[in-house]
Image (cartoon, rainbow, N blue to C red):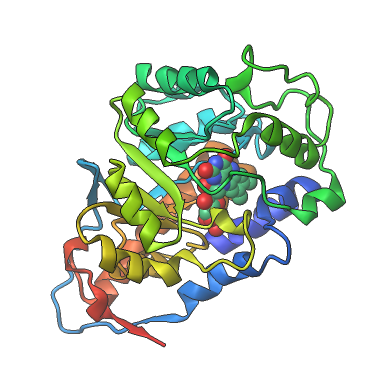
Amino acid sequence: MLPLNLGEYEEAARQKLPANIFDFIAGGAAEELTLARNRAAWDAVQIVPRVLVDVTTVDPSVTVLGRRWPFPVALAPVALHRLAHADGEAAVARAAAATGTLMVLSTMASTPIEEVAAAANGPKWFQLYCYTDKAVTERLVKRAESVGYEALCLTADVPRLGRRERDLRHKPDFPADVVPANFLGEVDLGSLRGGEVGTALAALTTSLLCPSVTWDDVDWLRSITSMPLVIKGILSADDALLAAEHGASAVVVSNHGGRQLDSVPAGAEVLPEIAEVVGDRLELLVDGGVRRGTDVLKALALGAKAVLIGRPYIYGLAAGGEAGVGRVLELLGLETELAMGLAGVTATSQISRSLLRLR
Ligand SMILES: Cc1cc2nc3c(=O)[nH]c(=O)nc-3n(C[C@H](O)[C@H](O)[C@H](O)COP(=O)(O)O)c2cc1C
């Protein structure tokens, strides 16, 4: 039976994938308190609809960094799509392009930057981690810029890798043909082949990521690219302000899907205070636990321009390849449009805090 919602896609993926790969995707760090909180925080927000509004036509589109999105949802950067399905990032790029949805390609993708760009010409951003070797970082940025990625999304919440105990327990198989493809020719990936995804990825991350990255590196990044800069992994208003001071155009309020520091708040919880402090200095995006159109509506009412989804589209990919990703996007788009209509708003510009009752 075709899944009816994103939760059912998670179940379909659970049936399809080996348990250790499913857990690599589904899991969070340590006690998984933040992972659970990401869902609970959206559920705790109530929508108070307005009635007797003409909702014959509802337009869920938004404009982010000057580009119109058909509805306020983008695909978050997720490592190694080919663990979920052989068609990997190329299938995701095609599904995203078919609906005009922005895809943020992970540095840790299992398909190279250029191949994903060639797979479909929909809008794309490139997600970056800074590496100890600045030349590696610079080459990745230039490659993305030269093939048309429209923004650089620096992930700031992985100075070191969170401890994901499901992976330590399972030691998931790492198929020989699934590698962080952007590093082919850059670093020796030999140690990863035939290894264990959790521990091998942790080893790669530890060896490549630079734990001493600071705001100075943000300035350096801005000096080597003309792509607008987005900083992902912001949870404090002070850091959001610093991001604005250092020239970021947008930030993603995010806790990395509960995979980094455990016990941090959900994006939904800190978004309002960040929105209040930054005003219109930055565009705000949020991710973590978004599974329903009503969550999208709540995110916009709390001050976000749009949301990102991570695991749900990977579950769509696992369950049905490109068509599965397309269906996940279609469902979330339909649910968002319906939530707006039932709440009595006909355009995203009309969505405000007054639609919410916060407990
Ligand atoms: C399997 C997996 C891999 C991820 N890989 C990356 C990554 O390479 N870069 C990054 O910035 N975020 C990564 N993330 C975090 C997502 O971009 C996003 O913040 C998170 O998944 C949002 O929460 P959600 O999965 O509940 O929608 C990953 C998340 C998952 C589940």
Position in image of residue 278 (x %, y %): 26, 60
Name the foreground residue: 85 vs 298. 298
Query: Is residue 8 positioned above or below 73 on the image?
Result: below
The image quadrant where one finds the N terminus is: bottom right
Q: Is residue 306 left or right of residue 328?
A: left
Please say whether residue 289 is visible from this viewpoint.
yes
Q: Between 336 and 264, which is closer to the camera in this rendering?
A: 264
Q: Quadrant of residue 241?
A: bottom left
Q: Residue furthest bottom?
A: 359
**Image quarter of the C terminus:** bottom left
Measuring from the top left, give residue 260's x and y in whole percent. Answer: 62, 54
Position above or below: 172 against 186: below
Q: Nearer the viewer, residue 270 or 300?
A: 270
- On the image, the x and y values in percent for residue 126 come to 43, 32
For the image, the number of numbered tags is 0
Task: Tell me: residue 98, above or below residue 8.
Answer: above
Name the residue rendered at 43%, 23% in the picture.
Answer: 141
Whether residue 316 is visible: no
Q: Residue at x 50, y 24 (%)?
A: 137
Residue 49: x and y in percent read 27, 82
Q: Residue at x 43, y 52 (%)?
A: 308
Instruction: Name which residue lies at 60% across and 39% down.
Output: 211
Q: In which image quadrant can residue 346 be found?
A: bottom left
Residue 34 horizontal side relative to residue 125, left or right = right
In the displayed structure, would residue 285 be above or below residue 173? below
Q: Which residue is more in the foreground, 98 or 177?
A: 177
